[in-house]
Image (tube, grey):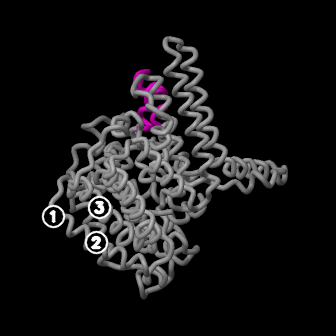
Amino acid sequence: MVFSSHIFIFYFLPLVVGIYYLLLWRGAGSNVRHFFLTCAGMVFYGWWNPWFVLLMLGTTTLDYNLGRMIVNAGDNQRRKKLAVVLSVVSNLGALAFFKYTAFAIESAQSVAHAMHWGDLAVPEFFRNIILPAGISFYVFQSLSYCIDLYRGHARPAESFLDFTCFVSLFPHLVAGPIVRYGIIADQMRHREHTVEKFSLGITRFGFGLAKKILLADPMGGIADAAFGAGAGNLSTFSAWIGVIAYAFQIYFDFSAYSDMAIGLAKMLGFYFVENFNSPYKSESITDFWRRWHMSLSTFLRDYLYIPLGGNRHGTARTYVNLMLTMVIGGLWHGASWNFVIWGGIHGGMLSLERMMGKNSFYGSWPKPLKIAITFFILLITWVFFRAETFEVATRYLAVMFGAGPQLVSTAPLLNAEMLRNFNMVQFIICALGVWAMPNTQTILHKFVWWKALIGLVLFVLAIAMMFTRGHSPFLYFQF
């Protein structure tokens, strides 16, 4: 089930919110409300494939009990380490099995072909593994619980129900933000339900839906046409338009999901961390990672970069740690060498910027120029992120820089399919949205009635447009 579907908007959401507030009005305790939210989360997650609910329940049950093992170990550090190692191995093992088995088989087959060994015999079972939606997100959230308990950064969940409710809470279940239990623990037992908070939540949801339907999806049509064009069917200009459209698409698509998730959480009385802060206004790649998918960047910093040693073991080790963190972060996004390259470029840029220092490289240049250079670098990385294969990525980059086969035409600047999807007004609105306008959380920092009215208008427009299109899942569902 996706937020931008009529089933969710007209059936699931009103029913869940209505029953939740009915329980609240009748004085039901937190256990009853959390049981209901847990059941709602299971229905939401199992809508596509009910069997995946068992996997989520399995990792949740294991981490809750390993968390109890850590708490009950007292001063027994050996027992604590055993519990946290079991949590890390089991969670990452499940993630690796479902997400990377096919990638490992494909890579092994490539090596076998290169060595002229022929095809490897692979059981059919391993060829048909289906990636459960959102596994990368809920595994990280469940895993962080045990690590935080081990470090003393979080209090244990008061009950298995509380922890299960936290993991299965449908607003953040499938595509984040990555919420840590330590941040939300107090809210599990004590949170406010106010008219202002609920109104802000509805308005935030409306803004997010509009960003997804009215901006991200049209940009996706342009990007799909550009990256799907065969050799000799794309001009240099079209290639640049296509990758810029993809940059707009992935930002408005994912930030829309975060807006909707944060809005839904507010409607239920929860506060979620912000996930985006105008990332295309970044003046460097380092700045970009302070603004883009902030819940992931802080997760990678706290649970990977710092444990690897961070910047505590010399300059060379720092650069190695940055590269490892970003390459692994790239692989987290998808099982493909393109994601490894994407992460490697980001890791290389982070290392280079750290090497050059704040006052070197392009640090003293005018702010608009720094933003433009950063966006240019990001566009290069987005090619690898979007292209289905390495060959498609290199061919696309070649066309972008005039070195590949191009569309031979003196008529339209874009090919026919891209022209059908191209809307200059939407393209300009996207550009204004990322560079000239304040972001959603800034606009909706406080509730004002006219903001709610704008949110309502955007919601109605998005709904009207939604019924003219087919199924449109969020991009990060595949990660």
Name the mark nearer the viewer: 2 or 3: 3
Dot 1 surroundings within 10 Å: few (below 14), some, or many (20 or more)?
few
Separation of marks 3 and 1 at Cα, in angstroms: 12 Å
For numbered disc 2, what is the local secondary structure? helix
Residue nearest the observer in this picture, 328 or 359: 328
Amino acid carrying label 2: it is: Leu
Residue 173 image point, x, y percent: 47, 50
Residue nearest the observer in this picture, 314 or 140: 140
Mark seen at residue 449: 1
For numbered disc 3, what is the local secondary structure? helix
Which secondary structure type mostly characterizes the magenta part of the structure? helix
Splitting the image into 4 quarters, where does residue 394 fall? bottom right
Which residue is the extreme one toward the bottom?
411
Mark seen at residue 202: 3
Residue 311 image point, x, y percent: 40, 26
Q: Is residue 303 magenta?
A: yes
User: Do we see residue 73 in this rendering?
Assistant: yes
Identify the magenta region: 299-323
Tally the marks: 3
Amino acid carrying label 1: it is: Trp
Q: Look at mark 2 in the image and give the residue it sits on.
A: 458
Q: Please report the residue visible at 47 percent of the width from the left and 69 percent of the height from the top.
A: 7
Separation of marks 2 and 3 at Cα, in angstroms: 12 Å
Q: Please report the residue visible at 30 percent of the width from the left and 42 percent of the height from the top.
A: 191
Q: Please report the residue visible at 40 percent of the width from the left and 54 percent of the height from the top.
A: 378
